[in-house]
């Protein structure tokens, strides 16, 4: 039976981590992730978890220690944001290529510079090709639910990949919210015991992690990684179904909101989906056939499932909370476009970059996006293929 | 599913479906199967007569390529000697017991 509590996004994550009771957590504080580690540290000192908490001197060490623990066969976690994730960079890739099922909450924050502590997705988007599964959360409830599911997804033998559980810095991480949590016992049963295939501490079956892997084998190992990422899609759905039975809350690869007969739609990730849903309801009440697609799973990129839903609309606006600086829009924009390319009839797709450095996304701006997208759906042309929404001239 | 043994030096190179996950090496002591002698462009030739049996070369050789039997240096394992020349640099014998010869100048027997 679930229990209703009022928590911030960070508290919800820390509480979920307490229920997971990982063997090892190695972390370094960074705004706005800090209080996840702070709350978790109090669970450790109060004896509420059996976790070995390693307080390291940097995020590079946090990820390195987490990798070492996971390679030793531990259920290991860390958490970070922004510059912290950037400092981890080198080892983030190694976690994925060693196929270690590490779960890492990421509290999304803009990357410097100039220095900014507020939300955008540039940090985790920068790590989009690192081989990690990425789940994005709209609110604290989803951050909590995604965290618990992430453990099961990561540790599934068909997957064995690390998972980032992303939530929006401050907006979600520090906003107090009413959510439903599971009983400790339910979480324990849901995630089960972790039995690693290999362990550096198993002297009876010694293994070596990280050997030199040259021209004749590296490529095969990368192929394994690529296939595991594809195999993760059905596993994510299986885990979601099991979680639905337990919690009553339904998760998919994305949420298709009022998309059934939609003529045009917005694609978005994270907390701004909430505001967009309000606008969709308002426009629907006024007779507009609008819909919202909120992407939950960005890695693996579920392009086939997206084709089925987005292939039916006439125009799509893809909203990115990060710029790729490619001169061709944000990462979500270009991947959605590529993902729909093979459709015989495909929607016209424009891109909007919004909310960088924590800039608010208001109802009026979303209405403007829908209005422009409607115009494109009716055969008009966008002033720009990609717009930096709400930026001053 | 059984985990296939990964032998780096073996003839057949395993495909991605057969390899252990994540580049993990399952068999112990497999560095021996990796013949670093392939890398060598200079070969150390050892002279038993000049050698004073101090075993400095055995201590310093980074590839464990100095063969020692009954506490005596007896020769070089060319399957693993990569030709770095450290043995020659470290040899304290009055007349250095090693001579580095270009592999190009060595006639294959
Ligand atoms: S270092 Fe020179 S003298 Fe000493 S054992 Fe080796 S070959 Fe002989
Ligand atoms: S050349 Fe280098 S690798 Fe070869 S025996 Fe001498 S020290 Fe060892």
Image (cartoon, coloured by chain):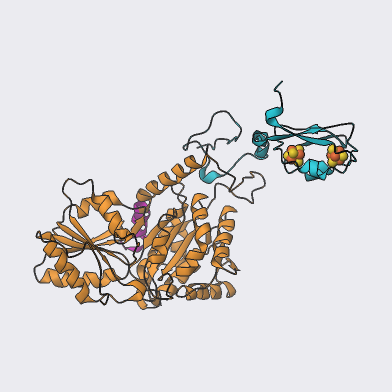
Q: Residue furthest top?
A: B109
> Would you identify the image quadrant in which residue A48 lies?
bottom right
Q: Quadrant of ligand 1?
A: top right
Residue A285 figure quarter = bottom left
Percent x, y of residue A358: 35, 75
The C terminus of chain A, quarter of image: bottom left
| Residue drawn 25% across the image and 54% down it | A337
Q: Give the x, y percent position of residue A203.
A: 67, 47
Q: Is residue A242 magenta?
A: yes
Can residue A145 be seen here? The reply is: yes
Q: Residue furthest front?
A: B105
A30 relative to B34 in the view: left or right: left
Say if A195 sits above or below A14 in the image: above
Q: Please state which of residues A46 and B45 is positioned toward the viewer in this rendering.
A: B45
- Count of numbered tags: 0
Residue A78 seen by the camera: no
**Magenta span:** A237-251
Quadrant the N terminus of chain A occupies: bottom left
Residue A164 appears in which quarter of the rendering? Answer: bottom left
Image location (x, y in percent) of residue B7: 60, 34
Name chain B's colour: cyan
Say which colour chain A has: orange
B77 or A70: nearer the viewer: B77
The residue under the point 9% across, 60% down is A378
* In this rendering, position of residue A368 left or right of residue A239: left
Q: Is residue B84 left or right of residue B12?
A: right
Q: In the depicted view, which residue is nearer to us: A246 or A30?
A: A30
The answer to if A103 sits in the magenta stretch is no
Residue occupying the point 69% across, 38% down: B82
Please say if A57 is above or below A197.
below
């Amino acid at each position: 039976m679930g229990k209703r509590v009022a928590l911030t996004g960070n508290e919800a994550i820390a509480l979920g981590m307490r229920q997971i009771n990982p063997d090892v957590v190695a972390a370094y504080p960074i705004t706005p992730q800090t209080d996840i580690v702070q709350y978790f540290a109090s669970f450790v000192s109060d004896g509420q978890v059996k976790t070995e908490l390693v307080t390291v001197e940097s995020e590079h060490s946090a990820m390195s220690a987490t990798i070492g623990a996971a390679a030793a066969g531990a259920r290991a976690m860390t958490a970070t944001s922004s510059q912290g994730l950037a400092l981890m960079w080198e080892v983030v890739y190694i976690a994925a290529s060693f196929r270690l099922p590490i779960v890492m909450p990421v509290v999304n924050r803009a990357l410097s510079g100039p220095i900014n502590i507020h939300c955008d997705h540039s940090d985790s988007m920068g790590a989009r090709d690192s081989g990690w599964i990425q789940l994005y959360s709209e609110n604290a409830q989803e951050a909590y639910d995604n965290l618990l599911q992430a453990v099961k997804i990561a540790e599934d033998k068909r997957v064995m990949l690390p998972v980032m559980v992303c939530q929006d810095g401050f907006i979600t991480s520090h906003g107090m919210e009413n959510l439903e949590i599971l009983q400790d016992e339910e979480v324990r049963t849901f995630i089960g015991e972790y039995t690693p295939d290999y362990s550096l501490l198993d002297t009876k079956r010694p293994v070596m992690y990280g050997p030199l892997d040259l021209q004749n084998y590296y490529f095969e190992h990368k192929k394994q990684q690529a296939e595991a990422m594809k195999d993760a899609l059905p596993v994510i759905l299986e885990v979601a179904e099991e979680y639905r039975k337990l919690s009553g809350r339904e998760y998919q690869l994305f949420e298709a909101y009022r998309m059934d007969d939609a003529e045009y739609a917005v694609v978005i990730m994270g907390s701004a989906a909430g505001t967009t849903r309000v606008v969709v309801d308002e426009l629907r009440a006024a007779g507009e056939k609008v819909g919202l697609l909120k992407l939950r799973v960005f890695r693996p990129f579920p392009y086939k499932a997206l084709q089925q839903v987005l292939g039916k609309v006439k125009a799509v606006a893809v909203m990115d909370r990060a710029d790729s600086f490619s001169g061709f829009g944000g990462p979500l924009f270009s991947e959605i476009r590529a993902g729909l390319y093979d459709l015989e009839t495909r929607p016209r797709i424009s891109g909007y970059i919004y909310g960088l450095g924590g800039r608010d996304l208001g109802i009026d701006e979303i209405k403007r996006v829908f209005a422009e997208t409607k115009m494109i759906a009716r055969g008009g042309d966008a002033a720009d293929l990609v717009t930096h929404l709400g930026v001053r001239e | 599913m059984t985990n296939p043994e990964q032998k780096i030096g073996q003839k057949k190179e395993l495909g991605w479906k057969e390899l252990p996950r994540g580049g993990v090496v399952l068999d112990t002591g497999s560095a021996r199967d990796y013949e670093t002698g392939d890398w060598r462009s200079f070969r150390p030739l050892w002279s038993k007569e000049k050698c004073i049996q101090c075993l400095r070369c055995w201590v310093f050789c980074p590839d464990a390529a100095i063969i020692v039997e009954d506490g005596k240096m007896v020769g070089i394992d060319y399957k693993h000697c990569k030709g770095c020349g450290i043995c020659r640099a470290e040899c304290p014998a009055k007349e250095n017991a090693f001579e580095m010869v270009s592999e190009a100048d060595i006639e294959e027997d």
